[in-house]
Image (spheres, helix red, strand yellow):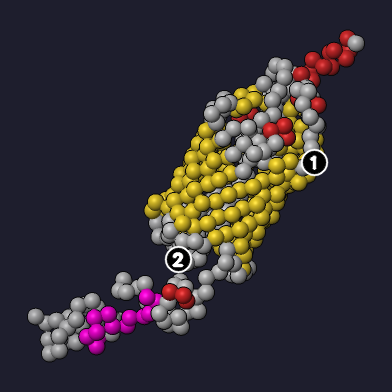
Amino acid sequence: MLQMAGWTAAIAGALLAAGVGEQGASAQRNIDLEQLHPAQDSQGFLGIEATATPGHLRYSLGLWTSYSRNPLRVKLADGERRDVVKHRLGLTALGELGLGDRGAVGVEVPMALVQRGSTEPLADHGPSLQTVAFGDIRLSGQYQFYGAPLGRGRRNDGPGLGGRVILSLPSGDEAQFMGEGQVVTELQGLADFHVFGAGIGVLLGARVRPHARHIAGQRFGSQFLYGFAGQVPMPVWRDFFAIVEIRGATGFNGKHASPVEGDLGVALERGGFTFRLLAGGALSKGVGAPRYRVGLGLVWTPPVRDADGDGIPDSKDECPHLAEDFDGFQDADGCPDPDNDNDLVPDVDDRCPNVPAPEGDDADGDGCPDH
């Protein structure tokens, strides 16, 4: 009996997988371990969104699956490490709808298809780990404050600034480390820059928890969020990209509340479909940063019909088989304008392309009136 009591006391002193020190008695579970939230459309990186939104009433639908190893470990009072969540295979359904040229709303529905591990080290008298569990549904709103809107399905070069608001609803299974039992708000600031298929993205934000959560005696309150992503085109195939991304969070109260993850991935765009593949893992020992992770995602955005490839859809293009010349003159109608001012001097030779030269007042033929 004394030996059994000693083992019980040791188990009750379980600690988080962050390798933190000894802790007290009972543990709670109402925290979401998942730190990877996939980009909702084809313009994003891996877990960091692009500033551009899909365009008015254009939508994206996606599925993402990922396997993570050891997203939650604990260390007993005697120094022994034990797995609580050893294996997790997750599935996430995604949806996004553009509102205007710069706005969008989205939804993310996560679940665990397979979980393996043991909750015994927590000694909290809670249920054992279930194979299947549902997570907190996330609703998002996004707006692009600066930068060119998405060019009818084509990413525009240049800088962009945007913001997102995300509400995590208390729909997940708290006892299975899939939900928090409260509305959690995330505020994200986004910045990116794209040129010739290459791009970089930055995320800065905050996760606001109205009430702090605890696991194994460790406190998890509001957190500062950050991330960096880089993308370069690969010459193997057209629209094939390599991506590197780092994402992290910190609660400023110990490494257990400061998970950091790094991932390498590729993306391939074909006919409205975007395929993503990633592999990575923890760069810190914070809760939710798995030892390693692999993931596969698919996003579908209905392609825009654009026969002349000028970025203006055929439904709005007055010249669907002649590409717009985009010179700042009547660029929205989809028709080329080789002589904007109709003075019979082609724009390529006209020094005043938008100022007509009256007949007889252009002796040198430069397209500008002489008087």
Residue that badge 2 annotates: 151
- Of all residues, the one furthest to the left in this rendering is 371
Q: Position of residue 238 (x, y in %)?
A: 59, 70
Q: CA distance from mark 2 to mark 1?
A: 44 Å
Q: Mark 1 is on which residue type? A: Thr
Q: Which residue does the numbered mark 1 point to in the structure image? A: 131
Q: Is residue 292 visible?
A: no
Q: Specify the farthest residue to the bottom.
A: 360
Give the x, y percent position of residue 220: 60, 27
Q: Give the residue at the far right of this rendering.
A: 1
Judge whether residue 371 can be spotted in this image. yes
Residue drawn at x 55%, y 31% is 209
Give the amino acid type for the residue marked by disc 2 in the picture.
Answer: Gly
Q: What residue sits 79% from the left and 29% below the top?
A: 127
Give the structural element (helix, strand or loop) at label 1.
loop
Instruction: Judge by depth and name the residue closer to the eye, 24 or 196.
Output: 24
Determine the image quadrant of residue 62. bottom right
On residue 157, which mark appears?
Answer: none
Mark 2: secondary structure: loop
Q: Position of residue 182 (x, y in %)?
A: 59, 32
The quadrant the N terminus occupies is top right
Name the foreground residue: 316 vs 203. 316
Q: Is residue 336 magenta?
A: yes
Q: Is residue 163 above or below residue 185?
A: below
